[in-house]
Amino acid sequence: MKPRHPQARRWPRHVPFAALCLVFLASLPGVQAAQAPARPGKAAIAAAHPLAVAAGEEVLAAGGNAFDAAVAVSAALAVVEPYASGLGGGGFWLLHVADGQRDVFIDGREVAPGAATATMYLDARGEVIKGASISGPLAAGIPGEPAALAHIAEHYGRLPLARSLAPAIRLAGEGIPVHERLQMGLRFRRPAMEASPALLEVFYPGGKPPAAGSLLRQPDLATTLHRLGREGFDGFYRGPTAAALVEGVRAAGGIWSLEDLAGYRVLEREPVRGDYRGLRLTSAPLPSAGGIGLVNMLNILAGYRLEQLEPAVRKHLLIEAMRRAYRDRSLYLGDPAFSRPPVEQLLSPFYAAGQRVSIRLDRATPSEVLAPGAAGGGTGSDTTHFSILDAEGNRVAGTLSINTWYGAAFMPPGTGVLLNNEMDDFTIKPGVANAYELLGAAANNIAPGKRMLSSMTPSFLESERGVAILGTPGGSRIITMVLLATLDWADGGDAHSMVALRRFHHQFHPDVVEYEVGAFSEAEVAALEALGHRLELGTRGYGNMNVVTWDYATGKVDAASDPRSAGEAQVY
Ligand code: GLY
């Protein structure tokens, strides 16, 4: 493995010296450089809603590239999946620019407002104020998605921003057919929505829940998108939209200022990279924990001949790798502009060799013996992911978030912008879990202008065989879902098997393995329990993965959308 990351500083204190010696025993096969043919000649889009795929297709047909299509898909998702992503939220767009074979990570994560404090969700006794980081405008960070769309269009797209936003503007103005997930989320979040008349007006037209198949119009959102298209960054972060956002937020007890909006900046970052058995991984750097966790887990697993092991032992090792990566997430990670997470060390195969030393083949490691550390499990019913390849070989893996169904459940009047509750991804109070049961340390404390730690993991996999573009929503489970899909691709799987494979997840705390029906055979359940793992069968499947692949040898471009949801995958 050849980790590369600019923010490396110090060696985590618990790395045993023996690990440094054992690295020489670890199996670390060299990586063959992937030799991509010049261009795929075909394009593909996989996303969580057919109307978003259609928006991307329209923009490709108008002469746009993958980056224009990413803008179109992102904006359309904001309209058709308002509970999962949108202009009030943020996201990460991992781009591959075919001309020059360059990868760049666009960080459009929200930031804490200037008046935010580390204790803003605690009462006078230091107790967490229930729901304060989940519902209402105080839960909302300064949005990043509109700035990211303007940035991508300006620096990477071929079409004007207004052209790429046109399908979304049309969908918002003319209406979208109400679908099941939209209704389900509305039912779930209705109590919190009561505090936002503007939001109720949109999502409960005439005071009633919208009927399945009826048209849901979002005229204010159409106007806001139109202004963004016409004026770019200033169309959202300055002028009438910004004024209405700040006025609405402050009138309802929030703390945003005009300066917060005007001061928002998109960041371009160097992606995290790692290698695993001939496969090159390019993924999300901080402020996402995704790429670091993924490379760390692959580094741990690279020391075993997984294919030669019994399935139950193989799964035991995956669980132990997950446990260790999530422990470190909670201990060390946060916005690198505010602390110095030991990134290079966490990405190092030497460090992984040290972690392997603590893994027994014949017994689960109780999380408490790996203390100190605290991370936890939770469900993810928010966020969205899309994957795009264009005919020239440009690629986008985009994972965008409105958290916990309809975010903060608050809409500043006259904007159509549903605010997110991404502030909950900060450490609200050491020792207190967030919506995903994730606990954090000081590295992820709230501070003005800081970006909250994320699990979003948009990724590229490359090998001699070809390339895969992947990612998924799912809160804290995102990173383990991308790990399982990566291992599937490494084992010869394709886009369809990657999105469909049965999932399991461990995140250090609680010390439990959550699994989907079919993830373990009866014999594996018995074997894993005998090793000491506590297993919990989930009642529903989780995740909504969207994958595009390009096979270099055959030239085949393929795409698949998660069978657990109602997304679509198209090859053009
Ligand atoms: N809101 C989910 C995440 O960023 O991980």
Image: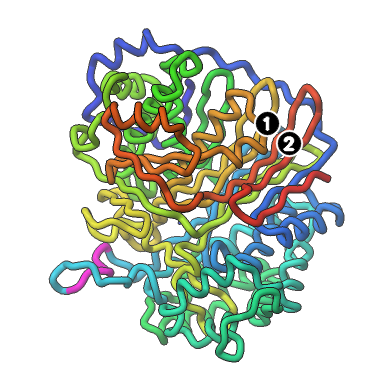
Asked if the stretch drawn in magenta spans residue 304, the answer is no
Residue depicted at 69% across the width and 71% down the height: 231
Tag 1 residue: 467
Residue depicted at 38% across the width and 49% down the height: 335
Q: Which mark is residue 498?
A: none
Q: Could you say whether the residue bearing mark 1 is in a helix, strand or loop? A: strand
Other-residue count near label 2 (Cα within 10 Å), few / some / many at <14 / 14–19 / ≥20: some
**Magenta highlight range:** 118-123
- Residues 551 and 237: in front is 551
Q: Is residue 524 found left or right of 46 in the rendered image?
A: left
Looking at the image, residue 211 lies above or below residue 396 = below
- Residues 209 and 120: in front is 209
Tag 2 residue: 98
Residue 224 is situated, as x and y percent measured from the top left of the image, at 64, 76
Query: Which quarter shows the C terminus?
Result: top right
Q: Earlier in the sequence, mark 2 or mark 1?
A: 2
Q: Is residue 340 visible?
A: no
Residue 351 is situated, as x and y percent measured from the top left of the image, at 33, 24
